[in-house]
Image: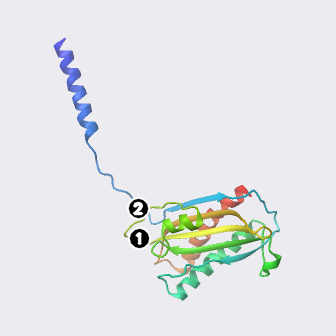
């Protein structure tokens, strides 16, 4: 009997001691991590063939040079137009002919914080920052031309790939836009 009690106490003690041990876990940071979030604001849908126009939005002050900002916005504008065209929508330069507008912006976390994004845009994907990498955000929304109301908002956060070639940047941009816009198409 004493042997059973001693065995039970020993077993309980070993379980208790092992439960108190904490092993610090290293957080693996993947340079290719991407966090995406979106929200449907109003139930308006657009049929294929609907015309849209782009409405880029810029951060007031940025740590990037003007040429860098222009190049990044062109990459995203081209990817957005291509993605929407591939899904049956048509881009128009005539704003008055648009059924909906596509507003978008790109910024580094050093220029636009998660708190500001959440306060101004209403959603933040919540990708954790990393001191070794530059976190950036891509924000996009669909605004109905007739009502002026936002129909859908999407956001993606990832880490800047500063050493990629132009071709790699274009491919990554197209992939990011496609993954975010997929959430719009599913609810359209």
Other residues around mark 2 within 10 Å, as few (<14) / some (14–19) / many (≥20): few
Q: Look at the image and name its color scheme.
A: rainbow
Q: Secondary structure at mark 1?
A: loop
Q: Which residue, given by chain and number where applicable, does mark 2 sit on?
A: 29
Which image quarter is the C terminus in? bottom right
Q: Which residue, given by chain and number where applicable, does mark 1 sit on?
A: 133
How many numbered dots are placed on residues in this image? 2
Residue 145, quarter of picture: bottom right
Q: Secondary structure at mark 2?
A: loop
- Up/down of 128 relative to 23, above or below: below
Other residues around mark 1 within 10 Å, as few (<14) / some (14–19) / many (≥20): some
Q: Are marks 2 and 1 in contact (CB under 8 Å)?
A: yes
Instruction: Name the residue: 62% across, 63% down.
Output: 154
Instruction: Name the residue: 55% across, 76% down.
Output: 169
What is the x, y in percent for residue 27? 37, 57
Q: Which disc is residue 26 wearing?
A: none
Instruction: Name the residue: 58% across, 84% down.
Output: 70
Name which of mark 2 and mark 1 comes first in the sequence: 2
Foreground residue among 114 and 94: 114
Foreground residue among 147 and 84: 147
Residue 26, quarter of picture: bottom left
Disc 2 to disc 1, C-alpha distance? 9 Å
Which image quarter is the N terminus in? top left
Residue 4, quarter of picture: top left
Residue lying at the far top in this picture: please name it. Answer: 1
What is the x, y in percent for residue 106? 56, 74
Foreground residue among 67 and 116: 116
What is the x, y in percent for residue 28? 39, 58
């Amino acid at each position: 009997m004493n042997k059973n009690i001693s065995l039970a106490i020993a077993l309980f003690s070993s379980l208790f001691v092992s439960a108190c041990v904490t092993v610090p876990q290293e957080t693996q940071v993947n340079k290719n991590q991407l966090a995406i979030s979106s929200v449907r604001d109003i139930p308006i849908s657009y049929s294929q063939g609907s015309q849209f126009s782009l409405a880029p939005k810029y951060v007031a002050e940025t740590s990037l040079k003007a040429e860098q900002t222009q190049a990044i916005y062109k990459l995203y504008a081209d990817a957005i137009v291509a993605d929407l065209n591939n899904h049956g929508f048509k881009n128009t330069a005539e704003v008055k002919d648009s059924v909906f507008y596509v507003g978008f912006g790109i910024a580094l976390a050093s220029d636009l914080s998660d708190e500001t994004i959440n306060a101004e845009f209403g959603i933040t994907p919540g990708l954790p920052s990393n001191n070794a990498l530059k976190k950036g955000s891509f924000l996009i929304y669909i605004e109905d031309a007739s009502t002026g109301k936002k129909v859908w908002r999407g956001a993606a956060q990832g880490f800047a790939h500063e050493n990629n070639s132009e071709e790699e940047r274009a491919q990554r941009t197209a992939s990011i836009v496609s993954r975010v816009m997929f959430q719009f198409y599913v609810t359209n």
